[in-house]
Image (cartoon, coloured by chain):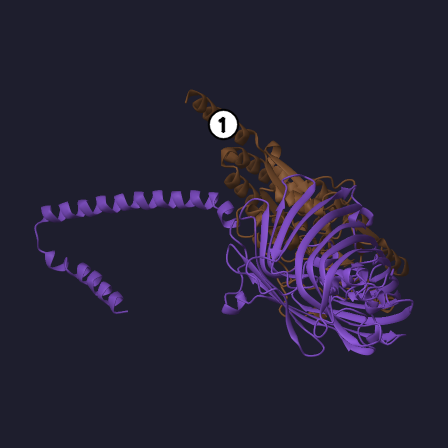
Chain colours: A purple, B brown
Amino acid sequence: MFRKFTLAAAIGAAFVAPVPAIGADDAEVQKIRSEVKDLKQGYETRIHQLEQRLEQTEQRSPPAAAAAPAQSAPASANAFNPAISLILDGQFSNLQRDPATWQIGGFIPGGDEIGPGSRSFNLGESEFTVSANIDPYFSGVFIMAVSPENKVGVEEGYVQNTGMIAGLSFKFGRMLSGFGYLNEIHAHAWDFVDAPLVYQAFFGGQLNEDGIQARWLAPTPMFVELGVETGRGSAFPGSERNKNGINSGMVFAHLGDDVGISNSYRVGASYRATTAQDRTYDDVDSVGTKVTNAFSGDSKIWGVDFVWKWAPNGNTVDRNFKFQAEYLRRKEDGSLAFDSTATNLSDAYRSDQSGWYVQGAYQFMPRWRVGLRYEELNSGNPDIGLVNSGTLTAADFPRLAENDPKRTTAMVDFSPSEFSRFRLQFARDEARFNEPDNQVFLQYIMSLGAHGAHKF
Amino acid sequence: MNRWTTFAAALALCTVCSAAFATVNIFACLPEWAALATELGGSKVSVYQASNALQDPHRIEARPSLVARMRSADLAICTGAELEIGWLPVLLQTAGNQKVQPGHPGFIAAAEFVDRLEIPTRLDRADGDVHPAGNPHIQLDPHNIAKVGLVISQRLGQIDAGNAAYYESRSKDFQGRWGQAISRWEKDAAPLKGLRLVPYHKNTVYLSHWLGMTEVMYIEPKPGIPPSAGQLSELVARLQAEPADAVIRTAYQDPKAAGWLSEKTRIPVVDLPYTVGGTAAAKDLFGLFDDSIARLKAVKK
């Protein structure tokens, strides 16, 4: 303010100053006049030139103007808030048999998160997701699951980068493992209420990994993706080992393409190896006493997966069909300790088990879908050293008796909008030894907040 | 030593020649951007069109084939404004291609460069599938095509600097022809001013705005929410009280609801191409507007 005033005063003084010049001789005045005239003319030509240049620039400028966004984003610190979304889900279950007796007969149980859940109304896991770009190099995703028992868990929490090296994407942190097809898809996007039995038997539902995953996409018109993953391996079928270094390794490959404009597919193969140390499970011995057994050794699993999607002209809105199948085979080789907390007898253990499912979901009109799933597991007959040597009998390992669990599931779901879904599911579950269970579920899945993108 | 020099020279030559003959790979999310990129890039670009006019642009599957094409793209042209939010983020995240990440010259979100209509003043999913950045169906105003065209030409010149002069001359040529076409369309469509339309979805807003037509009501009760039988009957009652000139159905939409409404109200259905390829006549951008105007004028007679 003060500066402006000084400037004005100076300019004023400059104009006032010539006044005393009155009275100087005419020749000098003439000279000054002509100088001023020259100066004025000089400025006028320069101003004219500048005007012309400005006009030319204006004519040329639309591309430059168009290259800038037309409407600017709101400027506020909150504008940087990450995308937040929440999944609310729950179900009403009607189970013919006591869910406490549920087991996948013939298989070492994979934790306590498997099975049909409890009877009556059940709140599912509420899933809270926060995601955003971290900087020009990384983006982050955090998914917190709150269980109906009010336990909070980190389902996923990873950092990722894509394209720092052409075709390469990597993630590190806690993530859903890239094994197979369904494992990477969040439960709320599944076509059925529950995971296939083979996932429940081999991964305890869904396989999480604390580690690092890298994927490389080939620069070909066909989708060819190769991936590796390694980590802590503490989740079933591995176990916490209190060991430096890495405890699991996985490789996977995916191929995919379109067939015409209405069809597309993806096929994949995965192999994962991990090690378990004193991975305990509960059983009863031949006289009905509760015992805790423990497996230690290598757990190797491979699988193939296949997904086919159809939509007339590729327009999924009115009708579409999705076919999906996976086959998994797991070999475990190590030792099995019987009654590890008391008697603690231990000898070799070897198993070779497999399972598969095939399912289809058909949207026959907007909002409505029907689905059918059939699955089978084959427990094989595990090689138990303690039984072979005659120390114990097969009746001391009732959970490991040979069994071929099966399940048939049918569902119909209705989605009032992209963000809400209701599902009715009926299953005939033959996972237990010779005790079929009829299960009915009525489920809701609601998503609030940021619009998530859908994986293939 | 000599052998190495020859090898290095050959390698350098190869790099130069491959650079000279390499085409710019363009991934166009939607048919209109594929058509525009082809007009502007000519023989120096290779355009992959990720979706067609019979597919709802909100609901494209993030198919493996699209991920693979995104992997090799030098330039991705999409609408943005959340139109492709259900699928584009998956492609960008899994393709492992830094060039086309938002913020790089290789990514164009066309809607950022035009004046968007219907920017909501309140954001609530109770209002249906609203887009916070405004209505994203920007391609039906030819002035928007011209603006996005300038951005594409500028980016092509930036990505493929060796051919900058080529892109500039093609841009001048296209903008010239497009400007003339706009004047012709505006003259031709003058009688459409005030035409009262009932579109299925709010995807022709820019066309109506440009030509001064009025969208009196929509078949969808809220964006992205299909109408129930009750809502359709209510629409019939409202249209009887307050008639309209045409029911609008665009190429990717199910004809049933529009057909039913037309039958009940005797208001004709106009099938608009919506984008390039939506009708046989809309085989390029010029055809898109020629055909859209011709089809609308047909109801006026």
Asked which quadrant contains residue A248, the reply is bottom right
Residue found at x 49% / y 24%: B10
A286 lies above or below B149: below
Please give the residue where the numbered disc 1 appears in the rendered image: B11
Tell me where residue A121 appears, x and y as whole percent: 81, 78
Relative to residue A159, is residue B118 drawn left or right? right
Tell me where residue B233 appears, x and y as whole percent: 87, 67
B11 lies above or below B273: above
Tell me where residue A247 appears, x and y as whole percent: 61, 58
Label 1: state its secondary structure.
helix
Residue found at x 88% / y 58%: B260
Asked which quadrant contains residue B262, the reply is bottom right
Residue found at x 69% / y 66%: A279
The chain ID associated with circle 1 is B
* Residue B188 visible in the current orientation: no
Relative to residue A100, is residue A188 drawn left or right? left
The quadrant in which the N terminus of chain A is found is: bottom left
Nearest the camera: A240 or B121?
A240
* Residue A255 visible in the current orientation: yes
Relative to residue A84, is residue A183 drawn left or right? right
Nearest the camera: A229 or A444?
A229
Asked which quadrant contains residue A93, the reply is bottom right
Residue found at x 49% / y 27%: B11
**In the displayed image of the protein, which residue is found farthest to the top?**
B2
Mark 1 is surrounded, within 10 Å at the Cα level, by few (under 14), some (14 to 19) or many (20 or more) other residues, namely few
Nearest the camera: A164 or B236?
A164
Tell me where residue B156 appears, x and y as whole percent: 55, 40
- Three-letter residue code for mark 1: Leu
